[in-house]
Amino acid sequence: MPDATTSGGILLVFAIVLPVAGVLLSLVVGGRQVERIALIILPCNLILASAIFFDLWQSGSQLIYIVGDWQPPLGITLRADGLSAAMMVTTAVIICVVGVFAHADFDTRAQPFETRAPFVFWVLLMAIGCAMNMIFLGGDLFTLYVALELLTFAAVPLVSLDGRAETIQAALRYLLFALLGSILYLAGTALLYGSYATLDIVLLSQRLRVETATLVAAVLMTVGLFAKTALFPLHLWLPAAHAGAPASASAVLSAVVVKGSFFLVVRLWFGVMPGLLGFDGAQLVGGLGAGAIIFGSVVALRQKRLKLLIAYSTVAQIGYLFLMFPLAFDSVSAQLQSNGALTGGMLLAMSHATAKAAMFMAAGLIYAGLGHDRIAELGGAARALPMTVFAFAIGGVCLIGLPPSGGFLAKWLLLDAAIATGQWSWAMALLAGGLFTAAYVFIVVSGALGSPHEPLKLRVDVPKYQEAAALTLALLSLLLGLVALGPIDVLQVRPEAMMAALR
Amino acid sequence: MTSWFFADAGLVLLVLAIGASTVFARQAFDAAIAFVVYGLLLAIAWVRLSAIDVALTEAAIGGGMTGTLLLGAVARLRSAEPNNTRLGLPVRLATGFCCALVAAGLAGALPLLPEAIPTLAPAVMENLTHAGLGNPVAGVLFAYRALDTLLEKVVLLLALLGVWSLAPNNAWNGIPGLRLYERPNSTLTFLAQLLPPVGIVVGIYMCWVGANDPGGAFQGGTILAAMWLLVIIARLEAVPSIGQLWLRIGLVLGPAVFLAVGLAGLVLANGFLAYPPGYAKPFIVAIEFALTISIAAVLAMLAAGPPKQVQQQ
Amino acid sequence: MSGANLFGMCGAALVGLGLYGLITNPEPLRKILAFNLLGSGVFLVFGLISRRAAAAGFPGDPVPQAMVITAIVVAFAATALAVALVLRLLEQTGRATLSADNPVREKGNP
């Protein structure tokens, strides 16, 4: 039975149209007003995302909007299911808090004329919001391709925003990897369209057959998306790019942007082709994830600079996310089940996003305050910037997976799935990762708590609201585990057509 | 029609040979020239595939604009220190093997596509009259999948912003550092006086006719961008500074009109980006015109590059 | 094998060529060229699908053609951004390289 536009569906349209309008308006109205426009658009985006979330929670069924009144396969549909809504709210909150944080670094009203870095930053921040919403809501693989490109073009200039040669190099490398990823994804969609004459996600899941062309398409698309998500061993671009960007940009890049392509991997495998992966494929993905955890954590431990440590920690945490593939694989039906492992994985993505954003913001404040971010010389930072170091520590607690943080709940769900399916090796990988994370968080925090050689004087006055922003996100990550009390059921809201196809 | 088959085979061999020389040429300049030729050959290939709109776009943007960009870059990179680090032979062989595997996988999957290929062509044609258009590709771009086209325009604007962000801090709001031709009274000036009037008419015509025949906003916009660039390089017009209001409005006009029509669809028709029955064509033509202006502006400014000099007051 | 199939195979070969160039060529500008080659190969695959899917009476399926037009424009935008990055790198350091081990010397940041 074809989809029909639901009553809340118009919210989906506004979630995309609003940031686009913001970008267009900013270009015309010009530099000094851009921040004001952004600080209106971003909270509205948060309100929209929350409205979508609550509508989903209350009604228990997804929101649909058929664009242009053309039914798929001819037209495009926007769909919000549980996964979309949860990720939309998380992303919207992070972007809003980053917006508050960035006011100090990118104040557009500091000069009487339009200045480069602030103008570019605010417009790109709105564009990232638009692109992420598009990725979460898009119901057609080609629309998702356009959304991926939007995300890439919004993220790459943020890396080179300060204009130093290393960051330009990092941005170029990022761009080349991202373009490779997009073009491989596009090649896959070509084969899929050739086989099924549609790129609509729900229709594809219904028409899918296990055959060579589809397998080749799936491999191409997945490898492309792995390159964009920086899964080991295609992670080479990430550390330099995320560490080199300004603090607010690093926060958005690590927390939000990499989750975009990750979300598409989940959509593709859990939504379109759950039966295609096979046991070996799932184990392979899990193996890459475990490799990422070990590699990223070990290299993070050896870093001398804080921002690079956090960037390598992102490489490791991304590996965690992919562990959910072997854990969600049900050998009986030979399919990926949308069960506890999926919920755990998505919750891990959300907690990592909030915690990592907080950690990057804290690192940025430490850099600004101390003038450097060398881990060996962090002594005295805790006394000089208590809120900041506390935020970093809380974010670390969430990444390690201590209760009641989101990380704890997520790992609990994943361990549950591991034990239920008897896959002890992945449980070991999870626990080992937690230990590694504890190690590098401890190194940083104990360094900051130590006493300096000479009394520490801050180079600049770090505004309290910036510290408060970092702390807010850190506390959010800590309390994310409390969603078990209710909202977590939202993650299970999936389209009926897909559920029917799965049975 | 075996004679056509041999012609196609010859074209394919030529394309592959020129493509290979793009990758394996020693000098960057040779590679860039080969790429321009490659783009034009591809345009012919698209004509053989009966995709005229794509052929026009490939010739204009793929061959023309990209070639211009790359040649300009090659010229500037001549002053760079040479890069002598080449990967060792074993690594190159291994990479070559993997790439051959990927190509083989793709090529192998193609004949395995189902014989009776499912297609959307009948559905497109059926609904085309409902949308009031004669060009099926325009129907897909502006009616059925209009959201993709709208977002793609935003993608273009973001790329431009990214290029602009690479300016030095004090040159923001300045003039793009497009290399201008120094000598007056030369062949270039003559061409820049002769071609643009013709080019502008062709560009506008191509946009107008796109509703019913191959053509449309992208193709027309590219021609207009090329004419504008020609006039600027020959110093018949000044390079605009990036902060100029008329430039910003021109850039934003296309997507803004598109968005406005889309939102109007909420009131006048059945939903976002839906058209009132019977009135689709005027709306779509209006969108295409606005889009042509914007695409011309964006493509020209993308080729011009980031601002270099502070604007002279 | 019809003409359209030939072009599809050509597209696959170009994908392989472009991928090889993207990975092995050390200079960023050549990588960008190779990426364009790779992209055009993928577009030819779309073209094959469009032509093959021509039901009786229609010259081709317009949906893949529209997708290719969109993708060509996006690829140009990507090329423009990448070229701008390369040229800026050249201005800053006097060389255009992606290798991280060679120390990148700043050349008087304007």
Image: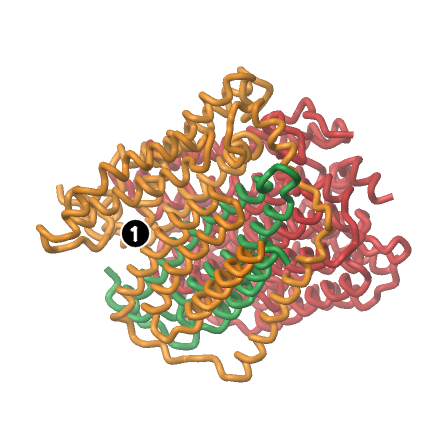
Chain colours: A red, B orange, C green
Q: Position of residue A502 (x, y in %)?
A: 83, 44
Residue furthest left as drawn: B185
Q: Residue at x 70, y 46 (%)?
A: B117
Q: Nearer the viewer, residue B298 or A444?
A: B298
Q: Position of residue A433 (x, y in %)?
A: 69, 66
| Left/right of residue C56 with respect to residue B65 in the rendered view | right
Residue furthest right as drawn: A332
Q: Residue at x 50, y 66 (%)?
A: B13
One can see residue A468 in this view: no
User: On the rendered image, what quadrant is the C terminus of chain A found in?
Assistant: top right
One can see residue C52 in this view: yes
Q: Residue at x 50, y 37 (%)?
A: B149
In the picture of the structure, the residue carrying the numbered disc 1 is B305
Crowding near the residue tagged with mark 1, few <14, some 14–19, many ≥20 C-alpha atoms within 10 Å:
many
Q: Is residue C8 above or below residue B240?
A: below
Badge 1 element: loop
Q: Nearer the viewer, residue A462 or A79?
A: A79
Q: Residue at x 68, y 30 (%)?
A: A64
Q: Position of residue B198 (x, y in %)?
A: 25, 38
Q: Position of residue A49 (x, y in %)?
A: 61, 33
Q: What's the amino acid at mark 1?
A: Gly
Q: Quadrant of residue A309?
A: bottom right
Q: Nearer the viewer, residue B264 or A36?
A: B264
Q: Chain of mark 1?
A: B
Q: How many marks?
A: 1
